Structures are given as structure tokens and as C-alpha cells.
């Protein structure tokens, strides 16, 4: 029995050392798997194109300009009527080529929400992330969107919308 007592401390030391090494391997392995960062998904080419064109617009936009916006959507007819956007030194104004008749209650309905180029770029950024289908063409010199067609969901009817920018003029 005395011989087994003398070998027991060596056995305990070796076992303790092996246990510590095994725990270190386990901790390092677990830490490795928790610190692995997935590579970011590759950028969507449409999102890159929108960002590039927006930068082009920011760089080349005139201080004063005017354009007409037409909407296509499954919405009330007054929303589909064209309106003119004028921007002068960052201040936006909108004009409508129609009158808004008073209702029987005497209230005048508000015109549809107007959109300017910055609003259209926000729509495009959302569409590149959330829409099932996006088609857009840009003006070659200024970079603003000329035609936008968005289908937010292929599985829903009547959620498509389009914006057509025409008659763009840089004002003196």
C-alpha cells in the first residue's frame, strides 16, 4: 500500500494538469465560436446604385429647380393628378393644377402628400430593403430618379406604386 500512496500524488498532479488543459481547450473553443462574426451580407446592387445616384444628386443639384410629379397607384383619383414641385435654396413649394372642392360638411380636403427628390430617395432606400420588386431609372446628369416603380409585396394586390418625374428645369 505504501507504493500506491507514493504514486498517487503523481497521478493526481497529472490528472489535475490534464483536466486544466481540457477545460482551457473547451473555454477557448466555446469563446472562439461566440466571437465569430458573420461576414456582412454583400450589398445589394440596387442599394449601391441608389446610394451612388443620391450622391450624384447631392453634388449636382441646382440651387433652384422645378419639376412635375405624376403618381400611379391604386388610390383615389386626386392622388394621381400631377403636381409641380419648386425648390429654391432648400425651400420647397408645391402647386396643384386642380381645385379641391368643399365637401358637404364644408371642409376642404387636403391635397395628397407632395414629394420632392429627397422624399423619393427615402422611398428608394426603403424599397431596396423591403420591396419585392423595384424598377428605377435616373437622370444621367443630375442623378434624380425619373421613373420609380415599386411592388411592395408580390403576394398582395394593389400595393404597387409609381412616380414619374417630368419637365425638370434648373431655374436661373
Image (cartoon, rainbow, N blue to C red):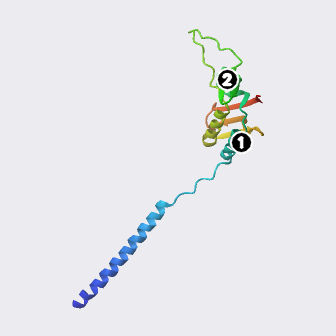
Count the labels in the image: 2
Please report the residue visible at 70 percent of the width from the left and 35 percent of the height from the top.
148
- Disc on res. 158: none
The reply to whether dot 1 and dot 2 touch (C-beta < 8 Å) is no
Please report the residue visible at 71 percent of the width from the left and 42 percent of the height from the top.
56
Q: Which residue is mark 1?
A: 56
Question: What is the spatial separation of the Cα atoms under label 1 and label 2, in whole angstroms?
Answer: 24 Å
Please report the residue visible at 63 percent of the width from the left and 20 percent of the height from the top.
111
- Mark 1 is surrounded, within 10 Å at the Cα level, by few (under 14), some (14 to 19) or many (20 or more) other residues, namely some
Q: Is 139 placed above or below 98 here? A: below
Q: Quadrant of residue 6?
A: bottom left
x, y (%) of residue 115? 65, 29
Q: Considering the image in quadrants, where does the N terminus appear?
A: bottom left
**Horizontal arrangement in the rendering, residue 82 relative to residue 36 (left or right):** right
Circle 1 SS class: helix
Mark 2 or mark 1, which is nearer the start of the sequence? 1
x, y (%) of residue 171? 76, 28
Q: Is residue 31 visible?
A: yes
Viewer-nearest residue: 4 or 90 = 90
Q: Is residue 131 visible?
A: no
Q: Is 111 placed above or below 27 here? A: above
x, y (%) of residue 128? 64, 42
Name, please, the residue furthest toward the left. 1
Circle 2 SS class: strand
Q: Which residue is mark 2?
A: 94
Viewer-nearest residue: 154 or 167 = 167
Viewer-nearest residue: 52 or 160 = 52
x, y (%) of residue 51? 66, 44
Amino acid at each position: 500500500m505504501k507504493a500506491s500512496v507514493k504514486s498517487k500524488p503523481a497521478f493526481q498532479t497529472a490528472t489535475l494538469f490534464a483536466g486544466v488543459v481540457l477545460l482551457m481547450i473547451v473555454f477557448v473553443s466555446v469563446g472562439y465560436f461566440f466571437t465569430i462574426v458573420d461576414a456582412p451580407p454583400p450589398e445589394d446592387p440596387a442599394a449601391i446604385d441608389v446610394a451612388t445616384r443620391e450622391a450624384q444628386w447631392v453634388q449636382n443639384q441646382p440651387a433652384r429647380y422645378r419639376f412635375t410629379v405624376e403618381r400611379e397607384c391604386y388610390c383615389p383619383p386626386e392622388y394621381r393628378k400631377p403636381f409641380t414641385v419648386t425648390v429654391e435654396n432648400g425651400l420647397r413649394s408645391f402647386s396643384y393644377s386642380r381645385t379641391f372642392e368643399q365637401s358637404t360638411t364644408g371642409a376642404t380636403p387636403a391635397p395628397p402628400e407632395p414629394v420632392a427628390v429627397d422624399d423619393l430617395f427615402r422611398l428608394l432606400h426603403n424599397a431596396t430593403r423591403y420591396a419585392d420588386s423595384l424598377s428605377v431609372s435616373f437622370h444621367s446628369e443630375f442623378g434624380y430618379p425619373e421613373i420609380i416603380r415599386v411592388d411592395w409585396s408580390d403576394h398582395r394586390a394593389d400595393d404597387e406604386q409609381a412616380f414619374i418625374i417630368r419637365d425638370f428645369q434648373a431655374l436661373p
